[in-house]
Image (tube, coloured by chain):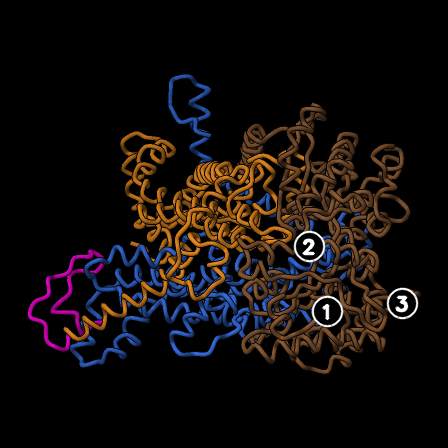
Chain colours: A brown, B orange, C blue
Amino acid sequence: MQHRHAARIAALMAAALGMGTLAACSGDDGESTTLNVTLANHVWTDIITEKIPEFEEQSGLDVVVTQLSEDQLVDNYKVKLNAGSADVDVMMYRPLQVGKLFGQNGYFADITDRVSGAGDWDWEDFQAGPVGLTTYEDQVVGVPMITESEMLYYRTDLLEDAGLEVPTTMAELEEAARTIHEENPGTAGIVMRSQASAAVTQLSGFLYSFGGTWLDDQGHSAIASDEAKEAYAYYGRLLHDYGPDQISTDMSWPESAAIFAQGDAGFWIDASSLYENVYDPAKSQVGDQVGFAPFPAGPDGSRPYNVAAWALGINAASQNQDNAWAFIQWATSPDMTLEIQTEGVPSARTSVWENPEGTESFPEDLAAAIAANGENGVGQDRPLVVGVAEAREIVGAPIVAAITGEDSDQAAEQANEQFEAFLESDG
Amino acid sequence: MSTAQTASAAPAGTGVRPARRRRAPRAKAYSAFRATMIAVVVLVFVVPLLWMVMASFKTNVDIQNTAKTFSFTPILDNYRHVLANDDYLGFVRNSFVVAFLATGISLLLGVPAAYSMSRFNMHKSALVVLLARIIPGVSLLVPWYYVFANLGLVGGYGVLVISHMFILIPISVYIMMSFFDSMPRELEDAALVDGLTPIGAFLRILLRLSVPGMATAAILSFIFSWNNFMFALVLSGANTKTLPVAVFDFVSYASIDWGAIMAATCIMTLPIIVVALLAQKYIVSGLTAGATKG
Amino acid sequence: MTSTSSDAVPISTRLSRWANQHRKWLFAAPAMAFTAMLICFPVGWTLYLSLTDAKGSVRRPADFIGISNYLRVLTDTDRFWPAVARTGVFTFGALALELVLGMAIALLLWRTFRGQRWVRVSILLPFVATPVAIAMMWRLIFEPNIGFANRVMGWLGLPPQPWLADPGMTLPTLIFVDVWEFTPMVAIILLAGLSTLPDEPDEAARIDGAGLWQRFWYVTLPMLKPVVLVAVLLRAIDALKTFDLLYVTKGQGGGSFHEAETLNIYVYGLSFKYNDFGVASAVLIIFFLMILAVMWLLTFRRKGAKL
């Protein structure tokens, strides 16, 4: 018995020793002059990280940037914020995907007073839609810095060969996709996302343009309405009838962009932020032949999503909130925003869009299409709920059914029931 | 396999076989068949890796063009891009530091433990350690982070080293236990007769004899640490990111740079392949620990 | 821990004597304590969470709801049981193929030949290469439109396949990748086993006129059984917990129809995608028990041999 006791003490001592040694060689921060900034891999991030030394110099702070790709970023936040960690000060996040969840969990610091008291920095300059998304229960929790809208990409050469005009309505789009598909064997008329939850955001423009919504006014599921069913059927029909011959149900944007960039499709519908993938000759075989057009109109007009894709917020557990705010203010200042937008990242500031300098770097038709989308756009591209990931899987299922040629109306009814049940327990 | 097994084979395990004389035509045919099959096996396992190496020398446009599988103009841009990325060499260093520390400390704890467990037949205690091998990693992430954050360990190498040790200690213990099991007990007895204490015998005699075993444990540990993804994904900080996580640096919000990803994976895999080439013997004996005794 | 020298100073002699007497635990305890500490807290935490309705964040107040998470999980035929089935199919499919192919390769490489060293090193590569890198590589190879796999199909005169993009083909394709990655490991373990076998029984059987297959099945294989079991044990643990490959190729959720969602991926999704920590913890505990049960079955059957 006694030796067991001794063993236990020895074990504890050894363990403590080990922990202590390791603690000694781990980096020590928590000093208020070190600011931990977590950013997603994005062009915006590439530009801002190059400028961070300027900020460090003027503020006297030491900025440590952690940069991760989107999925890893979210997982990383979830582990750290769940543990109540103060290791993150500034966090770049997706308001539509995690805004409600993080807000409800109390992960965000309330910055209402900071934004409204910032004078020249001019909070009023930010577009209303994006600001709505970074506000949680009347508290401002984030500053939107990147926007995106749903864009129609087309091949100028294929349209010309077929003697087609750029489609402006859903009917014209379907007709054009059919023509291109028939006249160019092996080429798809159109390509779009087909993976259930990834496709939800791209369906949203169709849903709104057909007159549908995700939720009705009372907050109940509206995905089995006639309009929604029409949108599902139309989206699926485009891909089923005129899509790639090898139609996969697992395409997100990289896969669909790759097909378009190889010259294997006439149209591609996806976010404006992705245009470099098909326009840049280093990434695309058809860079010279890409045209951009506003989202086509359905029975309810042209109603694409136009949203705040990314925003900057402050971790509520951060011990360094004043400095975090100083960083956000610097990174989203009018000048900085203009500078970044001229490098191709669409911003959420009205003044930058009104400034001719702000749009001159975009291809002309892209800038025009973004502007048109901005006027017609809807401020969300997915259901605004707490459990967004789960909701996307549910409301995305009928898309896949429609693409594979199954009865999408029935799938919508079924999804409607599941969505209704989900909404009841959501949050 | 054994029609070609000429005459009486030499004692098994020695690897020495009598030279083959006067083959019958049938044996010759078999031998050709065998050579072909071996070539096929090698090709199946190596060609995908070669394809990856080729892709790392292609532009993104060429990677997506199946007509250019073999006929392409090799470029170094991907490697240039990867190595120019902020601090990629820093990530290489992080991977090395974490792997070395984790391997070293794991051996320090694991080897004596394996000795005790083997010498005193502590199979139940061994199970406690081996349990770590079985537990699903997902269940560890949030609680660990919670504890480590409160201990102030997060953001440094410490937390990564600890998490990797969790995987490596069972490996060292497993390999070293089977190594000590195969060591004759008389060795220790003889040392005691010579006047050494049991611990002295362990340190001066047994440890020296178990260098090959420790090399095996060290190499496999190193590989497992180098390759670890899940723990590094959430536990590594800005300055301690390791290579498997850094691969995702080229998966961006609005673009996937396949060329750079392939270059990054080649860079990441290269040290491991070098280790495999140099230490093949030890890896094999590590894999087969416990499978073959004596 | 290493006070060994027996200098004349009484205290160090006493210490040394004490250390030598208690060396059994002195040696074993640090590793055991380290591991136990890192296991106990998470397992306790998971057990606790599995009995609550924790959701969103583990720091939000949660109610104790008894075993209802377990009931919910065990009656969930939408996600849980299909995930169990997929885990089983993946593990046993991969394991069976790896054993058969591994055995074939081991027999092929058994007797020495020229260049043997290089062959052994080259088949070792898939196993030692970083799994995340391997998964990235295969993801690109199996890309239906631009991948190398369909190019090879073209050379063989076969129609292109959707591979990972098709729900029906996903699991077989992933099993293929796992087989590619780990058959070498199985082969090398079996090869080492083969090389320790005595030749006499085989020789005797040959003299008795037994054929090739008979000698393998009735003589070699039974002698190799303990080695086969070790290979099964090592592979089974890792195959059940496969994460990197599935995460990289199909992402969280495992595709539109969850076609690649095994238990480990499901648990990851429940925790990090749905933030449903209560249910996730219940699945974790069940998953853990399942792995333990499989291990117990394997080692139990091994009792006849030696542990």
N-terminal of the pair, mark 1 or mark 3, is 3
Q: Residue furthest left?
A: B22
Q: Give the amino acid at mark 1.
A: Gly
Chain hosting mark 3: A
Amino acid, disc 3: Asp
Q: Residue drawn at (55%, 64%), measured in percent from left and top?
A: C293
| Marks 1, 3 in one chain | yes
The residue at which mark 3 appears reads as: A216
Residue beneath disc 1: A396
The chief SS type of the magenta part is loop
For disc 1, the chain is A
The region drawn magenta spans B1-27
Measuring 27% from the left and 31% from the top, which residue is drawn there? B194
Q: Looking at the figure, which quarter contains the C terminus of chain C?
A: bottom left
Q: x, y percentage for residue B86?
A: 55, 38
A405 vs B108: above or below? below
Residue C165 in the image, given as x and y percentages of width and height: 57, 70
